[in-house]
Amino acid sequence: MIEGLQSRYLDEGELKRLGIKSVGENVLVSEHATIVGLANVTLGSNIRIDSHVVILLSLIHI
């Protein structure tokens, strides 16, 4: 892999501190992803949100 291109993923504690309601198991969210409407976010299990993804939410379950 080219140095500097590896993404870091937020852990469950970081996601909850950002305001996400709940986090399932095996969840990967890149620190470079953009999620708008965090207070309405519930992340289920076995998901991955990579760098440069933009998600706009309003009472949605992923």
Image (cartoon, grey):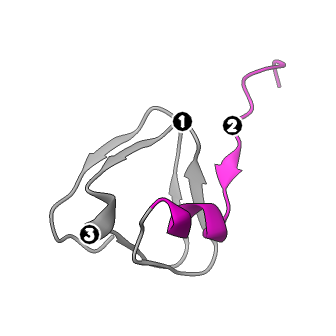
Where does label 1 land, which residue?
32
Q: CA distance from mark 3 to mark 1?
A: 19 Å
On the image, the x and y values in percent for residue 41 come to 33, 68
From this view, report whether residue 61 is shown above or below residue 52: below
Q: Residue at x 64, y 69 (%)?
A: 13
Label 1 sits on a secondary structure element that is loop
Q: Residue at x 25, y 56 (%)?
A: 37
Query: Was residue 2 drawn as part of the magenta stretch in this picture?
Result: yes
Q: Are marks 1 and 2 in contact (CB under 8 Å)?
A: yes
| Crowd tier of the residue under label 2, counting other residues whose Cα lies within 10 Å: few below 14, some 14–19, many 20 or above | few
Pinpoint residue 24: horizontal percent, then vertical percent. Answer: 53, 81
How many numbered discs? 3
> Which segment is the magenta one?
1-18
Q: Quadrant of residue 28?
A: bottom right
Q: Badge 3 is on which residue?
A: 40
- Disc 3 secondary structure class: helix
Label 1: few (<14), some (14–19) or many (≥20) C-alpha neighbours in 10 Å: some
Q: Position of residue 57 (x, y in %)?
A: 21, 57
Locate residue 48, reporting x and y percent.
53, 58
Q: Is residue 50 left or right of residue 60?
A: right
Mark 3 or mark 2: which is in front? 3
Q: Disc 3 or 1, which lies upstream in sequence?
A: 1
57 left or right, relative to 5: left
Please name which of the two marks, 3 or 1, marks the residue nearer to the observer. Answer: 3
Q: In terms of image quadrants, where is residue 62?
A: bottom left
Earlier along the polypeptide chain: callout 3 or callout 2? 2
- Quarter of the figure that contains the N terminus: top right
Amino acid type of the residue that numbered disc 1 sits on in the rendered structure: His
Q: Amino acid at mark 3?
A: Asn
Viewed as shown, does residue 61 lie left or right of 43? left
Residue 31 belongs to magenta span? no
In the picture, the disc for residue 7 is 2
